Amino acid sequence: MRDLRQLVSHMTIQEKLAQLSQLSGEAWNGGKLMGIRYGVTLDPALVRMAGSLLGASGAKTVRDIQTEHLKTHRHGIPLLFMTDVIHGYRTIFPSPLGMACSFDPAMVRESARIAALEASVSGLQVTFSPMADLVRDARWGRVVESTGEDPWLNALYARAFVEGYQNAPLDAGGVLACCVKHFAGYGAAEAGRDYNTTEIGDYQLRDSYLPAYRAALDAGARMVMTAFNALNGVPCTGNRWLFTDLLRGEWGFDGVAITDCTAVYELVNHGFCADNADAAAATLNAGVDIEMVSDTFFTHGERLLAEGRITMEAVDSAVLRVLRLKDEMGLFDNPYGHADEASEAALHLCPAHRETARALARRSMVLLKNDGGTLPIRDGETFAVLGPYADSRHMLDIWHCEGREEECVSLAEALAGRDGVTVLPCCPVNADGTSPAVPDAALDALLVKAAACDKLVLALGEHPSMSAEAGSRACLDLPEPQMRLLRKACVLGKPVAVVVFSGRPLALTEAHGLAQALLQAWFPGTEGGNALADLLLGRASPSGRLTMSFPHSVGQLPLYYNHLPTGRPKHGRNDPERFRSRYIDAPNEPLYPFGYGLTYASFAYGGVTLSASVMAAGETITASASVTNTGTVAAIEVVQLYLRDMAGSYARPVRMLKGFDAVTLAAGETREVRFTVDADMLKYHTPTGYQAEAGGFIAFIGPDAATENGAVFTLLG
Ligand code: BGC
């Protein structure tokens, strides 16, 4: 074992503070901080001694930087290379929200393993993933990076990501250490506006928002990133309760905590710190170790120590944690990690990785409507493909790491070998999210051509820049030129299928009313076009299920299925009573609920049967229902188990997802799908601890969160 404490004892204050500083890759060469309006020129000593770099990757680049660094570092402490490998490194998988709709954690784990493999040969050691933020408001652009609105499912996926990235000891090849983010509650940004404040009560925080971060840590994530938001008035980056009391104290986390990018400077903007020195002290004293892309520790640390505003003990502990991670990654013995140009050439975008990307993209797409069997398009049928995505390689959201649009397969390319396809691109969206007006005459001319085909496929949606960080929207409609195209297409009298590319749930109410079929494609990644063609042409059936509710209108947001009951619940969609918790001008229900998604088959559910109606502590019961494929083709049905706790010390959500089983059923096949219900599923953060409370429960089994197919049981005290 390397004696890291001894190493720390030989370091100067400046050397220690530099270990706690992460510079952007550009900074290392140019001495300039990355973007976001700061443009600070760095002290050359910090550039020379910094502990880690953000965003520098590529086997040759990393080797060159590390070689230069080690030439001048007095103790030979290597740099750590970190970046945002979010859903693939060079081979890009669907955006996380899309991946989540697969309801297939094993595939998500595999995508993370592949991402780690590609990134590790390019010299990276740490990824800023998974993002475990729970989201309930589709206005927030970063929903694209999340796995959705359910705490239990988010926890499952957070674990899957960590297991995929950290699939072997950290010094092994093909492994990335994980940094779970953004701690905590970033997804609750008020009004869906990015970086905005959050107010989350203790009950909601512990029950809904924290479980996924915790699951990532339980799975072994080595790092945690602060969130930009203030949580109940205290910015997370300087939140001592969050990082010291909860994370390090209550949860026993002893890994590295890092700020988000420039978040230390932002403590001044938050009105939480008077100046950068104050911000440095608040961050270190909160229990955070590394500042990302800012220089406050290095610039002010020595003075803060002299003034007793931070302690050497806190600095040493932070440095030790950073050095331990470097040691665990094997960098003291092999500072280049697994960076290897030959392996890059062999592994990046190799056929096996592309095939997994295609399979996962297929599983991520959600069929929202399919009247009259509009989809799939049958052999011999002719069809026109129109819209901005008809022949576009905008298949990647803005967190695409080293993925390149030119390496993506567009829909038109994927359909190229098929007879009877007419591709008519139109209505482009600019990178700033604006949509140039398209003259009616131009649309009409295209539609004359399209009208000669049996069916129309409209490939519509948002530009990737319209979601992700700083991609909040107040209006969630499809761009107006695209809606005009859709309205015109729908009067031709031909079946119209709309494919929606977006990072978030859009308000598709009008499109739902107009089109015969709707397929949600998300940003599907490198193999997006091929995956889409597989579904459109019926080579596979859609099987994705929504992990976020789709609203009728923006006014319903935040919108999520697992809300608490009210004292005046609305009884069904058509309840005429005014004095209910309701809108007078919109339904309460989403356009498409959580868990929803169609296939090319259809499924019938039998009633829920319980093995017992009473459950004593320590016992389990089995909840089951028969599921029959009543269609004519085989398909995957994601059978879902929800529980409701009828009365508790706190009001409990009207539904809570607690299990699912993705079963493949042949046409006509029936299967009894069984779930084991145990007391752990019934536990929550009560005022007197994490426990299950005796009383009545309902177990629902159905195709989505709106199911009423349930049976009652009692948990004994
Ligand atoms: C984002 C983080 C990301 C970091 C580094 C920030 O702007 O909020 O999610 O990990 O940049 O790229």
Image (tube, helix red, strand yellow):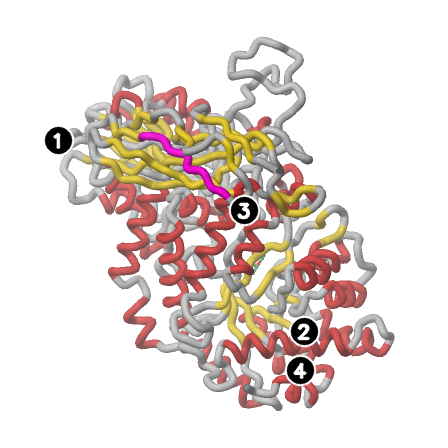
Q: Residues within 10 Å of mark 4 (few under 14, many from 20)?
A: few
Query: Which residue reaches farthest right?
Result: 307
What residue do we see at 31% from left, 44% from top? 362
Q: CA distance from mark 3 to mark 4?
A: 36 Å
What's the residue type where badge 4 is placed?
Ala
Q: Nearer the viewer, residue 390 or 449?
A: 390
Q: Of circles 3 and 2, which is in front? A: 2
Q: Mark 2 highlights which residue?
A: 318
Q: Residues within 10 Å of mark 3 (few under 14, many from 20)?
A: many
Q: Of the residues under marks 3 and 2, which one precedes in the sequence?
A: 3
Q: Of the residues under marks 3 and 4, which one precedes in the sequence?
A: 4
Q: Is residue 554 visible?
A: yes
625 falls in the magenta region: yes
Q: Of the residues under marks 4 and 2, which one precedes in the sequence?
A: 4
Looking at the image, residue 623 lies above or below residue 113: above
Q: Of the residues under marks 1 and 3, which one precedes in the sequence?
A: 3
- Res. 439 mark: none
Q: CA distance from mark 1 to mark 2?
A: 66 Å
Q: Mark 1 highlights which residue?
A: 380
Task: Look at the numbered disc 4 and give the secondary structure of its residue.
Answer: helix
Q: Of the residues under marks 1 and 2, which one precedes in the sequence?
A: 2
Q: Residues within 10 Å of mark 1 (few under 14, many from 20)?
A: few
Which quadrant is the N terminus positioned in? bottom right
What residue do we see at 35% from left, 59% from top? 91
Q: Mark 4 highlights which residue?
A: 45
Magenta residues span 619-626
Q: Mark 3 highlights which residue?
A: 142
Looking at the image, residue 92 lies above or below residue 192: below
Q: CA distance from mark 1 to mark 3?
A: 41 Å
